[in-house]
Image: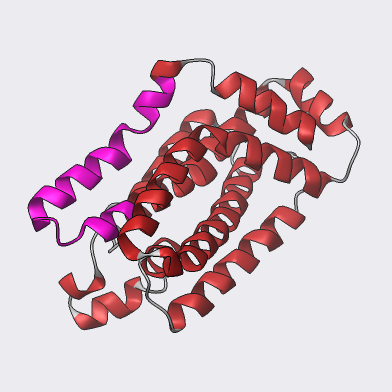
Amino acid sequence: MMALIEYYAKALTKGKFTLVSFALQPLSFIFIVYVVSGGRFFERALAGAIVSFIAGVGIADLSIELVGMKARSKFYDIVMSLPGGNWRKALGISVGISIPALPYILLLTLLLSWRLGLRAIPEILFGIVSLWLWSAGIGFFMGVKIREPLTVMRLSNLTVTALTVFPPVYYPNSVLPEKLAAVMNLLPTVSAARLMTGESGSVFLISIFWAVFGVFLLLKFRGLEG
C-alpha cells in the first residue's frame, strides 16, 4: 500500500501548474458564492469546496486512472503482484490519488474551523472521511465496470458536477423549497457539507450510511477485470 501511495505522490505532484489548475473550479465557486451572497454563505462555500475536491478526486480522477491502468497492462500487472490484499491495494491507490488535494483540503479545513470554532473540527473531519470513503468506493466501482476511457471521463465528470454544483453543497438548504431540500439532504455530498458546517441530527446517520457503502465497494475490489 505504501509503495502505491509513494508512486502517486511523486507522479501527481511534479507539475505545479497542474496543481494550480486542479484547484481553479472549487476556489472560483467560493469567490462566486461569497460575492453573490454578500458573505452570508461563506462557511458553506468553504465546505462546498472541500466536498468538491474530495468528490472530484474520488469519483473522477480515481475512476479515470483505473480505466487507464487497464490499457497500461504492465503497470496493472505490477500493482496486482504487490504483496498484500486487494483491499489494501485499493486503499493505497485511492490515498495516492488524493494527495494533490490534501494541501487545499487542509487549508480550507483550517479556514472553516477558524470561522466556526474549534468545536466544529470533529464534524468537519468526520464529514471529510465519510465522503472520501464513499467517493473512493464509487470511483473504484466505475473504474472496474467501465472499459472506455472517454466514457468514464464523461460519466465521472457529469456525476461530480451533478452532485456538487446543483445541489445545496455551496449554499444552504434553506434556499430551496422544503420538499426539494428534503430529497437533496439524502445525497452524500449535501450531507457532508451540512455536517461540516455544524448541522447535526439525520445528516450524521446519512453520512455514516454512505461511508459504510463506500467501504463495502472498496472491500469488493478483486481487480480491474470486473
Q: Is residue 45 above or below residue 226?
A: below
Choose top left, top right, bottom left or bottom right for residue 211: bottom right
Quadrant (top left/top right/bottom left/bottom right) for the N terminus:
top right
Q: Is residue 212 above or below residue 97?
A: below
The answer to whether any part of residue 166 appears in the image is no
Estimate the x, y position of residue 23 in percent, counting from the top left.
36, 33
Taking the spot 42% from the left edge, 51% from the top edge, the residue there is 109
Say whether residue 44 is magenta: yes
Taking the spot 43% from the left edge, 67% from the top edge, the residue there is 120
Magenta residues span 18-47
Quadrant (top left/top right/bottom left/bottom right) for the C terminus:
top right
Looking at the image, residue 29 sits to the left or right of residue 90; the answer is: left
Closest to the observer: 71 or 113?
A: 113
Q: Is residue 169 above or below residue 63?
A: below
Q: Main secondary structure of the magenta part?
A: helix
- Furthest toward the right, the residue is 83
Estimate the x, y position of residue 2 in percent, counting from the top left.
78, 34
Closest to the observer: 106 or 47?
A: 106
The answer to whether any part of residue 189 appears in the image is yes
Looking at the image, residue 31 sits to the left or right of residue 145; the answer is: left
